Image: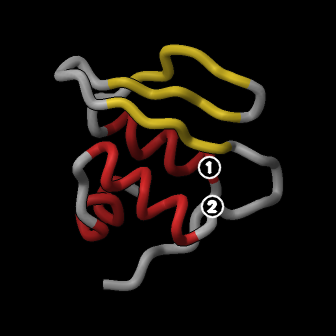
């Protein structure tokens, strides 16, 4: 399945809908955690989309499929 082209802020919002919370920020990266222990870092750069490989790594970290992410967006 093709990855959507999205900005970091939209990925953060989608992950929050999936139960994740921003636990801290490190520069322009939002560190997000789920109560069950899953964690990831989402780059939030103004005016820039998340690169496909980075988005794929985020999805692997949080154990979501592309279709699940699209539903949350």
Q: Residue at x 43, y 36 (%)?
A: 40
Please rate how many residues cluster around mark 1, counting C-alpha atoms within 10 Å: few if below 14, some from 14 to 19, many from 20: many
Measured Cα–Cα span from mark 2 to mark 1: 6 Å
What's the coloring here?
secondary structure
Horizontal and vertical percent position of residue 29: 66, 34
Q: Residue at x 52, y 36 (%)?
A: 41
Disc on res. 56: none
Furthest residue toward left: 36
Foreground pick, 69 / 42 = 42
Q: Which residue is mark 2?
A: 50
Horizontal and vertical percent position of residue 11: 50, 49
Q: Secondary structure at mark 1?
A: helix
Q: Secondary structure at mark 2?
A: loop
Q: How many marks?
A: 2
Q: Residue at x 31, y 54 (%)?
A: 60
Horizontal and vertical percent position of residue 68: 24, 60
Disc on res. 8: 1
Foreground pick, 70 / 54 = 54
């Amino acid at each position: 399945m093709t990855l959507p082209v999205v900005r970091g802020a939209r990925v953060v919002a989608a992950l929050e809908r999936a139960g994740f919370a921003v636990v801290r920020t490190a520069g322009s990266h939002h560190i997000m955690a789920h109560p069950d222990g899953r964690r990831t870092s989402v780059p939030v750069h103004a005016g820039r989309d998340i690169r496909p490989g980075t988005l794929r790594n985020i999805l692997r970290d949080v154990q979501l499929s592309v279709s699940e992410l699209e539903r949350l967006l």
